[in-house]
């Protein structure tokens, strides 16, 4: 399963947005997971950052997401370095409404790290976007 790049509305009805968050038009782009067939319950897709430099002061990470539809799955954000297991920073499950929502968090880490955004499919056809 892979994240897909899209403009305008998604092919699934009653799930995704009609426009992206930033431009607010169908010319703007966003990524999303299509969780209808052939995807199945528990399928995951991961979006990974490059390695980021250690932070000596608090940094900020934010993203806009749209999780709407019957039986929407889950989205998780992890921090991972080369020394420890991935650490969950945020987890969002299920229906979040038919509007773009903002996730924002402060990050401070003593060594270089990556951020992972993991999307997981629920049991029924639905989708969500970033």
Image (cartoon, rainbow, N blue to C red):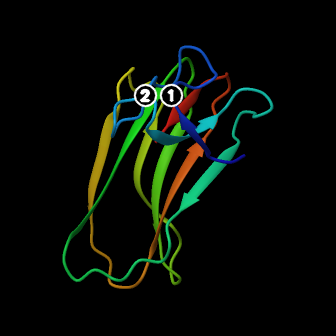
Q: Is residue 119 above or below residue 125?
A: below
Q: Is residue 123 above or below residue 91?
A: above
Q: Position of residue 39 (x, y in %)?
A: 75, 34
Measure the C-alpha gap from mark 2 to mark 1. 5 Å
Tell me where residue 89 sits by quadrant: bottom left
* Extreme-right residue of the structure: 38
Tell me where residue 120 sits by quadrant: top right
Query: Which element carries disc 1, helix, strand or loop?
Result: loop
Tell me where residue 40 sits by quadrant: top right
* Extreme-front residue of the structure: 27
Query: In the rendered structure, are the residues bearing label 2 and label 1 in contact, judged by CB atoms less than 8 Å apart?
Result: yes
> Mark 2 or mark 1, which has the lower sequence index?
1
Residue 98 is left or right of residue 119, and the answer is: left
Q: Position of residue 129 (x, y in %)?
A: 50, 36
User: Measuring 51% from the left and 28% from the top, which residue is drawn there?
Assistant: 8
User: Measuring 38% from the left and 21% from the top, which residue is drawn there?
Assistant: 97
Q: Position of residue 66 (x, y in %)?
A: 43, 32
Residue 123 is left or right of residue 112, and the answer is: right
User: Measuring 55% from the left and 27% from the top, which residue is drawn there?
Assistant: 72
| Label annotation for residue 8 | 1
User: Measuring 80% from the left and 32% from the top, which residue is drawn there?
Assistant: 38
Mark 2 surroundings within 10 Å by alpha-carbon count, few (fewer than 14), some (14 through 19), many (20 or more): many
Residue indicated by mark 2: 19
Residue situated in front as seen by the camera: 123 or 68: 68
Mark 1 surroundings within 10 Å by alpha-carbon count, few (fewer than 14), some (14 through 19), many (20 or more): some
């Amino acid at each position: 399963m892979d994240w897909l790049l899209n403009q305008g509305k998604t092919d699934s009805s009653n799930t995704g947005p009609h426009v992206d968050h930033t431009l607010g038009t169908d010319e703007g782009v966003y990524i999303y997971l299509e969780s209808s067939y052939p995807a199945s319950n528990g399928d995951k897709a991961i979006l990974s950052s490059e390695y980021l430099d250690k932070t000596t002061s608090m940094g900020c990470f934010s993203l806009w997401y749209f999780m709407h539809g019957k039986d929407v799955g889950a989205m998780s954000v992890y921090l991972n370095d080369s020394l420890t297991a991935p650490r969950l920073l945020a987890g969002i499950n299920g229906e979040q409404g038919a509007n773009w929502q903002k996730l924002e968090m402060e990050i401070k880490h003593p060594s270089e790290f990556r951020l992972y955004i993991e999307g997981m499919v629920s049991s029924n056809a639905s989708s969500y976007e970033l």
